[in-house]
Image (cartoon, rainbow, N blue to C red):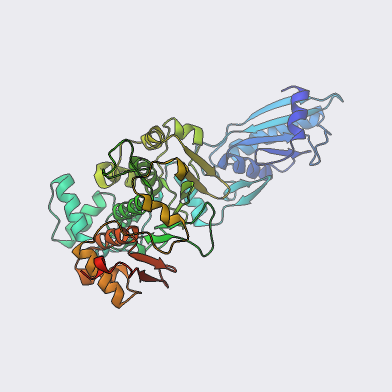
Amino acid sequence: MKAGELQTQISLGEDSTRQFKSDVRNAESLASEMAAFANSEGGTIYLGVADDGSLPGLDQANVARVNQLISNAASQLVKSPLTVRTENVALSNGRLVIVLTVPKGLDKPYFDKNGVIWLKTGADKRRVNSKEELRRLFQMTDQFHADELPTRAGIDKLDKLRFRDFLRDTFKQDYPDDTDELIGLLQNMNLATHDGMLNLAGLLLFAERPELIKPQFVVKAIRYPGNQIHVTDYIDTEDFTGPLPKIFEDAMAFVMRNLHKVQAGRGVNAPGKPEIPESVFEELLVNALVHRDYLVSAPVRLFIFDNRIEIISPGHLPNNLTVEKIRTGNSNIRNPILVSYVAKGLLPYHGLGSGIKRALSAWPKIDFADDRDGCLFTAKVHRQPVEELALADKGALKVQTEERYAPINASITDVQMQLVNFIRSNPAISYDKLAELTQKDRSTVMRNIGKLKDAGILRRVGSKKTGHWEINENHDQYLLR
């Protein structure tokens, strides 16, 4: 490094990759700084540079002393030992600056002499104090994965029918009748811990009501009017719960019912095609559910606006992944157990790293944002202006206007008639109660409710917990047949 290049770097000031020290005499303190850089993205310590960016430098005697101190700190006071690089840069006054480069660690986490783990936070460093931060460090080095985490769910929380069907269809194996045999099978399948409790992967994939144990791992969806988030105004909203395959199915249904249908070269009376290919949302939703960071206690959010659809996943891209890399098909596995079971057919899956490329191939107008400070990853799917679409169903436009209801364009089925009648008797009725009364599963009820909403027969008012249903009684020829 030449003096001019050194001056350029110093002029940028201290940040998470650069630190200035006019001198150093405490090897333990230097070791903690090295550990912080190694546990983060690596960085450079400029020795002989004051905090204000001035260059007092070091004389020859101090250069020898400091280089020896660096060697001792890196090899003896950091666990595991670090291989660092030093370079002496001559100043015009005859003194020297030592440029100490600490690489991003390959054997994280790194500890100081006292067993403390340090991380860089801007220009400073801080201790790792929480289990979540420690788990994330282990996760980054493939020593630990969030989907291995134990939960409070015993095997009694297992959805027996769902797991039975999976065993039969995938492994041609019967569901064990013996409890010990069942626990052993789940452990061998990496779905249960050594003490017989479901791990996070087992809970999310095969529990009957995983949201009772982990209420944060759901999908929250909202269709807003216009192009901005509103505090109180929305057209459609729903929380999707249950095992991941059910969440996926219900979230897909929400997206598809809120898309316009276009003729796409078909005849006037032919059913329309979605304005954006369904495969785009298959890939992006699978990506959000399988590759999100389950160490972050937050839901996946699905926002639908007039001009775009956003899928927001907790957790930024892992390790050294960037948006540019995932666009070309690069990937890192954050939740290997989930990925292995999705690959067995539990969700649409076409190979590791191919999902983003497939979505972009089907619909290039997708932007991705990796927010490392906010710990979020966002896929933003841009919609065409509605005036440019050859709509197959003109009624689809009505959901974005001030009309109270969209017009009915089809008669309703017997199941839908039952739902309307139960809702008329109890406008605050829940999906679970409707499922019980109609003797249908919850996903069937939700799918038919969605069709009634699309047809303009039902409208949800208020939130999921405190809101209620309104029925468009202006269409008695359909409701009272």
Whether residue 239 sits left or right of residue 316 in the image: it is left
| Quadrant location of the N terminus in the rendered image | top right
**219 relative position to 35: left or right:** left
Residue ranking furthest to the top: 2
Name the residue: 42% across, 73% down: 466
Closer to the camera in the image, 18 or 365: 365
Q: Choose between 368 and 79: the one closer to the eye.
A: 368
Q: Is residue 360 visible?
A: yes
The x, y position of residue 287, in whole percent, is 39, 44
Q: Residue at x 58, y 38 (%)?
A: 41
Q: Residue at x 18, y 59 (%)?
A: 161
Indicate the position of residue 320 as horizontal and vertical percent values: 51, 36
Give the image location of residue 377, x and y in percent.
Answer: 49, 46
- Vertical side of 196 occupied by 22: above or below: above
| Front residue (pair 479, 6) | 479
The quadrant of the rendering that contains the C terminus is: bottom left
Quadrant hosting residue 91 = top right
